[in-house]
Image (tube, rainbow, N blue to C red):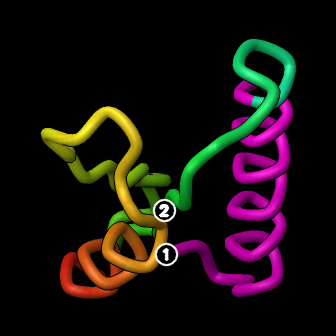
């Protein structure tokens, strides 16, 4: 983590907005996603794989929370 937690938060926000924007521009929608800042200061995106073509968003959120 960085010394300033505000910088970590800003990095997460910038990544999340950019990723959501990219998905919206490409697919016109997106499923829930998550990321975190590791103890060494790296931004780590979390993705869960679903075998369904159109997975239930609440199930994805549950899986994301389990990883976090």
Residue drawn at 48 percent across, 67 percent down: 57
Residue drawn at 75 percent across, 13 percent down: 26
Question: Secondary structure of the magenta portion, mostly?
Answer: helix
Above or below, 1 relative to 16: below
Q: Is residue 63 magenta?
A: no
Q: Where is residue 51 shown, x and y percent of the image?
A: 13, 39
State the residue position of label 2: 35
Residue extending farthest top: 26
Q: Secondary structure at mark 1?
A: loop
Q: Earlier in the sequence, mark 1 or mark 2?
A: 1
- Is 67 in front, or is 8? 67
The tally of labels here is: 2
Q: Secondary structure at mark 2?
A: strand
Q: Where is residue 49 shown, x and y percent of the image?
A: 20, 44
Q: Quadrant of residue 19?
A: top right
Residue drawn at 81 percent across, 27 percent down: 28
Q: Quadrant of residue 27?
A: top right
Residue drawn at 46 percent across, 62 percent down: 41
State the residue position of label 1: 1
Above or below, 4 relative to 47: below
Question: Magenta span covers which residues?
Answer: 1-23
Above or below, 66 relative to 22: below
Q: Where is residue 13 shown, x and y percent of the image?
A: 80, 63
Q: Nearer the viewer, mark 1 or mark 2?
A: 2
């Amino acid at each position: 983590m960085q010394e300033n937690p505000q910088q970590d938060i800003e990095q997460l926000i910038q990544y999340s907005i950019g990723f959501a924007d990219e998905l919206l521009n490409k697919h016109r929608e997106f499923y829930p996603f998550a990321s975190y800042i590791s103890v060494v200061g790296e931004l780590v995106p979390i993705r869960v794989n679903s075998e369904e073509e159109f997975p239930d968003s609440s199930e994805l959120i549950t899986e994301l929370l389990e990883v976090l």
